[in-house]
Image: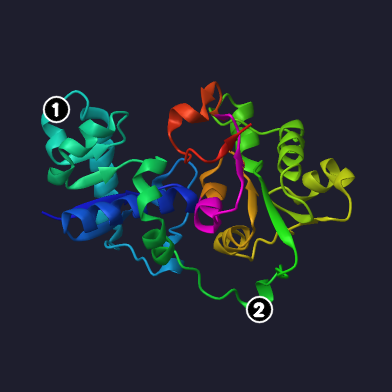
Amino acid sequence: MNIIIVIKGGLGNQMFQYAFGYLRSQQLKKKLYVLDLTSWDSFPRGFALKIFGVKPSFENKMLLKISRFFVYLLELLHSRVPFLNKFYLQDLTDEKLECSFADRVILLNGYWQRASYFSDYRNEIKRLYSFPLVPDEHAVLEFPLNKKHIAMHIRRGDYVSASADGGIHLVCNVDWYLRSLEFLKSKVTDAKIVIFTDDELWVKDQFGMLGDDVFVVPNNKAREPWIDLYYMSCCDHFILSNSTFSWWAAFLGERSNSMVIVPKYWFKGVKTETVGICPPNWHLI
């Protein structure tokens, strides 16, 4: 029996989902099919994995519409009808239980955001997510060998609007970034700060006091998200927002001497250490 992995959300979520499905298919020696349901998200996103050579396995719009309805029913019923779990697997909090019947599962529907899934396969995943060359018109950064770079990711946009509407996402404030930066700079000297954000004007206004040794990557709607992810991964050290996008930059770019700082809370009222998303060597502030 083969495996179908459901793809939804933005680039970071999609990378978690595909990497999980890919590793499971390799371990179980099964063929992996990619079911792209990004268009049915509450915030519709495009399928972003093509840049890594990954294509949706199903293109027929009617088939996708039927598949979305089928997946929606399974989301509602699987906890009430245990039989469904013989072929359907959704995110579980008990990893041992998940592994106990994963060899029988056909449909994987979840976010799969645990570091333990991927930590032992870092090199394989780096090959899976190797970036193409950045087009000349979108080249924004150079990395001289004599300078260290700190990537700081500041996500606002949908997090700010969703949080204001009572959503679960926590928006890291200026004080948190400054405390994280102070901690990192006490360990790392002579480093340039590179800020990646979806709110360039706000960042320039709030972080102008950091001086000339800061570069804010300009917003450009014509530049695809993977380009910022690539540049972020080229840095030496990382200050992450509670975002899967910046998580992947650190995971792909981390070296033996890198320092990675993440928020102590990943969601409102939910400590990051309880989510399991970060490797144990990353620093929680």
Q: Amino acid at mark 2?
A: Asp
Q: Which residue is mark 1?
A: 82
Q: Is residue 213 above or below residue 70?
A: below
Identify which residue, 184 or 234, lies in the foreground.
Answer: 184
Spot occupied by residue 212 in the image (x, y as percentages of width and height): 88, 55
Q: Is residue 22 above or below residue 164?
A: below
- Residue 46's disc is none
> Residue 101 occupies which quadrant of the picture?
top left
Q: Are marks 1 and 2 in contact (CB under 8 Å)?
A: no
Residue 113 visible in the shown view: no
Residue 192 visible in the shown view: yes
Mark 1 and mark 2: Cα distance apart in space: 53 Å
- Which element is circle 2 on? helix
- What residue lies at 32% left-to-right and 29% top-to-bottom? 93
Q: Is residue 75 left or right of residue 121?
A: left
Q: Is residue 75 left or right of residue 51?
A: left
Identify which residue, 180 or 186, lies in the foreground.
Answer: 186
Q: Does label 1 or label 2 sit earlier along the sequence?
A: 1
- Residue 136's disc is 2
Q: Amino acid at mark 1?
A: Pro
In the rendered view of the protein, which quadrant contains the N terminus? bottom left
Q: Is residue 222 above or below residue 243?
A: below
Identify which residue, 42 or 34, lies in the foreground.
Answer: 34
- What residue lies at 33% left-to-right and 40% top-to-bottom? 110
- Mark 1 neighbour class, 10 Å CA radius: few under 14, some 14 to 19, many 20 or more: few
Identify which residue, 95 or 9, lies in the foreground.
Answer: 95
In the rendered view of the protein, which quadrant contains the C terminus? top right
The residue stretch that appears in magenta: 248-265
- What residue lies at 51% left-to-right and 24% top-to-bottom? 270
Spot occupied by residue 26 in the image (x, y as percentages of width and height): 23, 58
- Which element is circle 1 on? helix
